[in-house]
Image (spheres, helix red, strand yellow):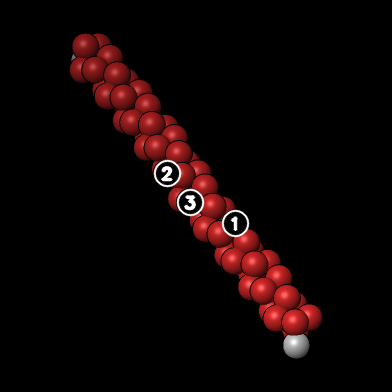
Amino acid sequence: MEFTDQLIQVTRLLLQRLRSGRGLFHKGGVLLGNIIHLINRLLHLNDALALLHGSRSDLLTS
């Protein structure tokens, strides 16, 4: 009986540890996703600024 209780307790502790680790990866994944979106937005902003700069030079030459 005591051995069974210890086995159940160890199993619960292992499952709890696995669940908490998964939560950490989820939070890290969200943070990584936010960083990727930020970089993507900055690249789009850079493209828009380049187009704006190009259109200014077109207006000046015509």
Is any part of residue 46 visible from this angle? yes
Position above or below: 17 against 25: below
Is any part of residue 11 visible from this angle? no
Estimate the x, y position of residue 20 in percent, counting from the top left. 56, 59
The residue singled out by tag 3 in the image is 27
At horizontal 68% and vertical 67% (from top left) the residue drawn is 14
Q: Which dot, 2 or 3, sits closer to the camera?
A: 3
Tell me the quarter of the image containing the N terminus.
bottom right
Left or right placement of residue 36 versus residue 44 in this view: right
Tell me which numbered mark, 2 or 1, is placed earlier along the sequence.
Answer: 1
Q: Quadrant of residue 60?
A: top left
The residue singled out by tag 1 in the image is 21
Q: Which mark is residue 34?
A: 2
Q: Which dot, 3 or 1, sits closer to the camera?
A: 1
Left or right placement of residue 48 versus residue 25 in this view: left
Q: Amino acid at mark 1?
A: Gly
Work out whether residue 36 or residue 51 is closer to the camera in this orientation and state it.
Answer: 36
Badge 1: few (under 14), some or many (20 or more) residues near its Cα, within 10 Å? Answer: few
Q: Amino acid at mark 3?
A: Lys
Q: Which dot, 2 or 1, sits closer to the camera?
A: 1
Mark 3–mark 1 distance (CA, rounded to whole Å):
10 Å
At horizontal 40% and vertical 37% (from top left) the residue drawn is 38
Q: Secondary structure at mark 3?
A: helix
Estimate the x, y position of residue 39 in percent, counting from the top left. 44, 35
Tell me which numbered mark, 3 or 1, is placed earlier along the sequence.
Answer: 1
Estimate the x, y position of residue 13 in percent, counting from the top left. 64, 67
Q: Secondary structure at mark 2?
A: helix
Q: Secondary structure at mark 1?
A: helix
Badge 2: few (under 14), some or many (20 or more) residues near its Cα, within 10 Å? Answer: few
Q: Quadrant of residue 10?
A: bottom right
Number of dots carrying numbers: 3
